[in-house]
Image (cartoon, rainbow, N blue to C red):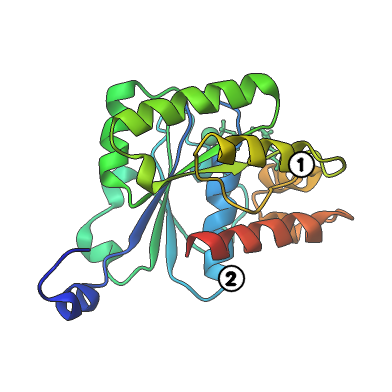
Amino acid sequence: MDSPFPALCYARAMPKVIAVTSEKGGVGKSTLAVHLTGALSARGLLAALIDEDGRVGSSLRWSRRQEGGLGFEVLEPDDVKPKRVAGHDALILDTEGRPRRKELRQLAERADLLLLPSGVSALELEATRELLEFLDEAGAARHTRVVLTRVPPTGLAGEHAREDLREGGWTVCNTLVRHYAAYQKAAEAGVLCRDVRDPRAENAWHDILQLSREVL
Ligand SMILES: Nc1ncnc2c1ncn2[C@@H]1O[C@H](COP(=O)(O)OP(=O)(O)O)[C@@H](O)[C@H]1O
Ligand SMILES: [Mg+2]
């Protein structure tokens, strides 16, 4: 932040706003937003998830599936008052399924970081490149990063997609979030992937923790 009083800016300690968005539905936004908030919280940071997908409200429903909740706050946009989020390290926004471009532009202005989850199939990568180009024209490329997700755990599809995007000049998180059934089970049970009974749950949680260290 440019300020003649950097110490004052630091003292104000505004939470870092991280928006998870995409133009398509079903790419893994809610899964990523829920788990990223969980991983930041597990690391001792104060993080809250804001469910901005009013139509589906999947993060909210996820958190209400079991009584104890997810171990962090899940808020609706109307709950987000400066007093309530003061002192938080991060606010993670789970955004709506098919945003209009105008909404994407506004989101880019509100967020410190835009995370774009993308699968590694040719079609998904094409859609992701289109969105990156739009965000670039909107002046938001600097704080936009692709997160490759639902990456096949075997083979090199994730590595190749990461390399191709980087060669195109885009910023891609190092962590490849691999495809594991533990995420689906976690959504069904209203918990995080580390808490489901699944032989790969630990691998899934490892990916998320690693990703969380790249963003905060
Ligand atoms: N890394 C992953 N591995 C396996 N399944 C995943 C992964 N990420 C998301 N999914 C599954 O993909 C589907 C869509 O994910 P979701 O997070 O609801 O997407 P969106 O919020 O973008 O619509 C869900 O069934 C979810 O469990
Ligand atoms: Mg969703």
- The residue drawn where x is 38% and y is 38% is 52
- The residue closer to the viewer here, 31 or 175, is 175
In depth, the one of 9 and 122 nearer the eye is: 122
Where residue 106 appears, x then y in whole percent? 26, 35
- Quadrant in the picture for the N terminus: bottom left
> Which quadrant holds residue 87?
bottom left
Which residue lies under the disc numbered 2? 42
- State the mark number for residue 179: 1
Closer to the camera: disc 2 or disc 1? 1
Q: Position of residue 56 (x, y in %)?
A: 49, 30
- Of callouts 2 and 1, the N-terminal one: 2
- The image's mark for residue 80 is none
125 up-or-down from 72: above or below = above
Q: Amino acid at mark 1?
A: His
* 166 vs 194: above or below: above
Question: Can residue 71 be seen here?
Answer: no
Q: Residues within 10 Å of mark 2 (few under 14, many from 20)?
A: some
161 vs 182, left or right, is left
